Image (cartoon, rainbow, N blue to C red):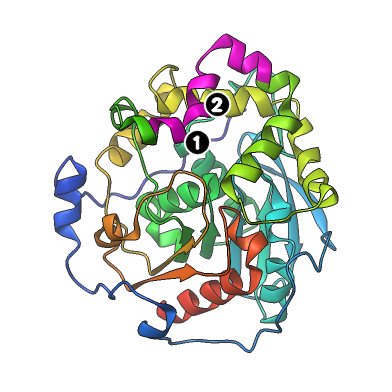
Amino acid sequence: MPAKTPPPTRRRFLGTSAVGAIAIATAKLAPIGSAEAQPRTKRADLPEIKPGSNTSFASLRQIDAGVLNTGYAEAGPVDGPAVILLHGWPYDIHSFVDVAPLLASAGYRVIVPYLRGYGTTRLLSSATFRNGQPSVIAVDIIALMDALKIEKAIVAGYDWGARTANIMAALWPERCKGMVSVSGYLIGSQDAGKMPLSPKSELEWWYQFYFATERGRAGYEKYTHDFAKLIWQIASPKWAFSDATFNRSAAAFDNTDHVAIVVHNYRWRLGLAEGEPKYDDLEKQLAEFPVIGVPTITLEGDANGAPHPDPSTYARKFSGRYAHRTIKGGIGHNLPQEAPNAFAQAVIEVDGYAT
């Protein structure tokens, strides 16, 4: 049986546009700037780790959660404060293969789930619609927290994972102790997705338009690994990842539902595919571009080749304690795998914001 959609918070936000939402969040904002310019309330003496030092997780598990049997890695003490690390597309849990042991060594209980359509995560019923709506992925993670009896967690991610964390923090702030979000505020709507961008910006989203066609769906199905490797190269142009590193993640794309869920996600975002009516109320709330009050640190790599907003455009979307960090050194889109120390430190710092 499909799980019930978790009830969204009853908090209502003023205004129905991004401009209106921005006007709400004027208090308690930290200035945007370098890491040195921001207040620090909690640090850990994390060991410096070379990216790629780890290649696997010690503990991989499965659990029924909502409509999914979710595969996830776990590290750290079971009674430690919970951190949920959320990967993007086309990546997988290995984005956090170095981050997870760093956080575990600092006493955190670290949960790293495969999102629906990736790795060992499976839909429990063949009759369930292969839905890639962003709100649905957030519902999946709330269901995972319920299954693991985690009342509250720090949520942290990039790409699809950052968007999922944003949605969780906006709709279920009582479940989120803090948030680390690469590329900032990524909540969108179908109406926003229908708005044309400049030709240069549209070019950056070429794969969305490819997926909008049946040829694109067939092409992604036929060349999934080649397609994903190209995205990795474009999104992180200075990251010299090895074939072995890519192949460890690419195995997650062999999930039988991967292509259907990815294609539905991008078609839905362009308004070219329908979602499920039971999530309409969540989407209506998200279409108001709600301000996020959960303590937040946003991160950006200095060499992110994927489409991403300028930090100055989203700072006012965060009304709680907030800071932004630009991570230097040729860091691209897959920030936690390329700069694991910086990502782990941000998680620990945002935990300090919440205490």
Q: Residues within 10 Å of mark 1 (few under 14, many from 20)?
A: many
The amino acid beneath tag 1 is Val
Point 43% across, 79% down: residue? 35
Point 54% across, 77% down: residue? 348
Q: Residues within 10 Å of mark 2 (few under 14, many from 20)?
A: many
Q: Read off the residue under disc 2.
A: 131
Mark 1 and mark 2 residues within 8 Å of each other at the beta carbon: yes
Q: Nearer the viewer, residue 129 or 272?
A: 272
- Relative to 199, say whether 146 is above or below: below
- Relative to 300, say whether 67 is above or below: above
Image x and y of residue 272, in percent: 42, 17
Q: Which residues are magenta?
A: 202-219
Quadrant of residue 53 in the image?
bottom right
- Relative to 98, say whether 65 is above or below: above
* Dominant SS in magenta: helix
Image x and y of residue 106, in percent: 66, 82
Quarter of the figure that contains the N terminus: top right
Point 33% across, 34% down: residue? 189
In terms of sequence position, does the residue under pointer 1 or pointer 2 come before the other? 2
Q: Read off the residue under disc 1.
A: 136
- Relative to 329, say whether 223 is above or below: above
